Image (cartoon, rainbow, N blue to C red):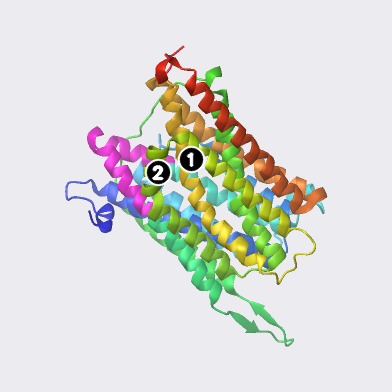
Amino acid sequence: MSLFSFFTFDDKTDMKIKIAANLSFLACFGAAGWIASLMNFGAEKLGLKALDFGLILTVNETAVIFGFIISFLLSYISESRLLGILIAMAGTGILLSAFAESENPIFGALYSMFGSSISSFAVNLAIFAFILSLSIEYFEKTRDSLVKHSTESSATSLIMSKISAYCLLGTAAGYMVVTIIGFIPMNIALADGSSADISYYVLYPLIGLPLIVIGIMSSKKAAAAKALKENVELIIRGKFFNFYILTFCTAAVNIIMIYFGAFFLVDKFKLSLGLIGLIFLLHSGLIFFLKGKATEIMKNKGEDLTMKIRYIVTLVFFAVLLLCEAPFIDENSFMKYVLLAILALYGLTTLFDNSIKSFISYFASPNEQRSNMMIYTKLIQIAKIIIPLAAGLLSLTLGFYGVFGLGVILAGVCLFISYKIYAAYQDTDEGKPLEEG
């Protein structure tokens, strides 16, 4: 099967689905480009610290709290039209980020609320991040709603897979744009003889404007569609306690390693925007091309072994990060290239996170599995809200030792729980799933 077959729809596919796939590309393109540039933009351009960065990441994820509003919106706006509006909103959040260095009188009350502990530039960026996150969060829910009731049940999984391919391609394209812009010198001479870097004034319009224009055009051409209301029963069982802990801690570990790891590289080693973009591009590429191989390894070696190896490797990576924070490692040390490799290769370990979801099938009835996949998603969202700010607060007193030390503790908990889950599986009746209740 050709790689390009994942991006083609047959002639019978509803045009609304094709438009949703194209808009999904744009959504991921914008989100990836924004997040890949955030570390350099925050540390180099705005002079932000780890606490500022943690606040931005936390606010960026709080949009999930307001996800229930989507049902209300769909009562008045068709999914097709709302998808375009949300993409335009996302582009607006990205475009406004270029002006985060200017204090806005409208946000004066927020500046006063945080005082000197949080930079006013961080407040600006957090607000724009919220707009972007809110748009992307609603977009995903609206798109899934559209797909589910616009296609036959037998074709839904195939359509979602094709849209997922568009998302992966959009993510890679966003990282690619950041990498290219990052390696192009964009300094202009000022009247006083100094120079200014205008990379971000080029990057954010380049990413945000296509989303605004295409989003508005798509919304105007959209056809009406029915809203989908789905009621899912949540089933929380004590026997899944270890699963809940592992899910939350794994999400937390990923946040600290990927985002704070990259921020650390910029803060201490002054890595350029191009190199940070390249890290995310390699990270994305490894996940895309080796996803099938990782699934094969999990099937052959078992989820328990792959989980243990994943967390042991993560602990080693955190140990290297802690070492690099030491004063005897200076800005020009070769260790920055070691960290570059580690952050790029970390994507390989996240491929095995699917073992958490697949391993629960040994314990759960079909109804419990469906419910716990929802809980799995919510726990990841909670981690994305809590952990960035918590890590930022730790950095106030302990620096990056506190941030990566938290990562070590969480990875250690994951390793411990992975042994307990496997032991629990051995205690089941001949390896069969436990009955519900």
Residue 158 position by quadrant: top left
Residue at x 41% of width, y 20% of height: 431
Q: Residue furthest left?
A: 11
Element assignment for label 1: helix
- Label count reads 2
Residue corresponding to mark 1: 306
> In the rendered view, does 240 fall on the left or right side of 388?
left
Please tell me whether residue 185 is drawn above or below residue 369 in the rendered image. below
Rendering quarter of residue 415: top right
Disc 2 target residue: 297
Is label 2 in a helix, a strand or a loop?
Answer: helix
* Amino acid at the residue labelled 2: Ile
Q: Are marks 1 and 2 in contact (CB under 8 Å)?
A: yes
Which numbered disc, 1 or 2, marks the residue that appears first in the sequence?
A: 2
Q: Residues within 10 Å of mark 1 (few under 14, many from 20)?
A: many
Residue at horizontal 51%, vertical 29%?
Answer: 375
Residues rendered magenta in the picture: 141-167
Predominant SS along the magenta part: helix
Q: Amino acid at mark 1?
A: Thr
- Does residue 432 lie above or below 148 as drawn? above
